[in-house]
Amino acid sequence: MDKIIKQAIFANGCFWCTEAVFQRLEGVIDVVSGYTGGHIKNPAYREVCNGTTGHAEAIRIDFDPSVISFKTLLEVFFATHDPTTLNRQGNDVGTQYRSGVFYNDEDQKTQTKDFIDSLTTASVFKDPIVTQISAVDVFYKAEQTHHDYYNQNKEQPYCQFIITPKIEKIQQFFAEKLKQN
């Protein structure tokens, strides 16, 4: 029997951060940094960063749903960024840093809407959630220099001050979901 692999596409700020977080989850097979949600073909990092392409920095997650559910991916997604800031994550400002779930099917769309509704009902966040929910159109892989960025650049100040705290957060709150190395 073949293993079923599904994909999730999330935009929640800098893809260096988000890639590093999701790589550590059991059941996640691969995480690829890239761009989605824009209006030009084959955008480059420099174009996306200037905010003129309409793309969001995003990650494509290949996961085994028999090990990790889409709902668990949503839990980590919402726990590791601020879904209440429009076009901003920390010091990263622009539409390319927006919060978004780019669903692959109606089930992912429904689960995302239901999850946001539950967070709203529970008043988890002080401000309204502004996460964009859109059907995925095209996902473009980022340039190779952006892949596995944190793991290869942990000593850089950005990685130490921005990404490492996110890793520590998932180690604290999602320890049972992490890969055992």
Image: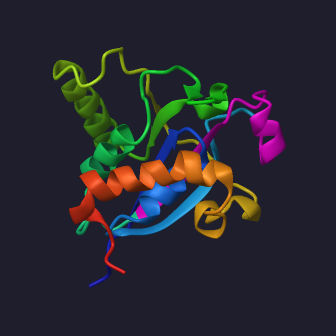
- For the point 33% across and 47% down, the residue is 76
> Which percent across, then down, holds residue 3?
32, 77
> Which percent across, then down, holds residue 77?
38, 44
Asked whether 121 or 114 is in front, the reply is 121
> Which percent across, then down, holds residue 55?
67, 35
Q: Is residue 22 above or below residue 78?
A: below
Q: Is residue 135 above or below residue 168?
A: above
Furthest residue toward left: 122
Furthest residue toward bottom: 1
Asked whether 110 or 147 is in front, the reply is 147
Q: Is residue 94 visible?
A: yes
Q: How many marks?
A: 0
Range drawn in magenta: 40-62
Does the stretch in magenta take in 46? yes
- For the point 35% across and 14% down, the residue is 127
Q: Is residue 141 visible?
A: no
> Which percent across, then down, holds residue 75?
28, 44
Q: Is residue 140 above or below residue 54?
A: below
103 relative position to 97: left or right = left
Does the stretch in magenta take in 110? no
Quarter holding residue 33 = bottom right
Asked whether 146 or 47 is in front, the reply is 146
Quarter holding residue 89 = top right
Asked whether 6 or 56 is in front, the reply is 56
- For the point 21% across and 64% down, the residue is 176
The N terminus - image quarter: bottom left
- For the point 43% across and 47% down, the residue is 104
20 relative position to 43: left or right = left
The C terminus - image quarter: bottom left
Quarter holding residue 35 = top right
Q: Is residue 163 above or below residue 37?
A: below
49 relative position to 122: left or right = right
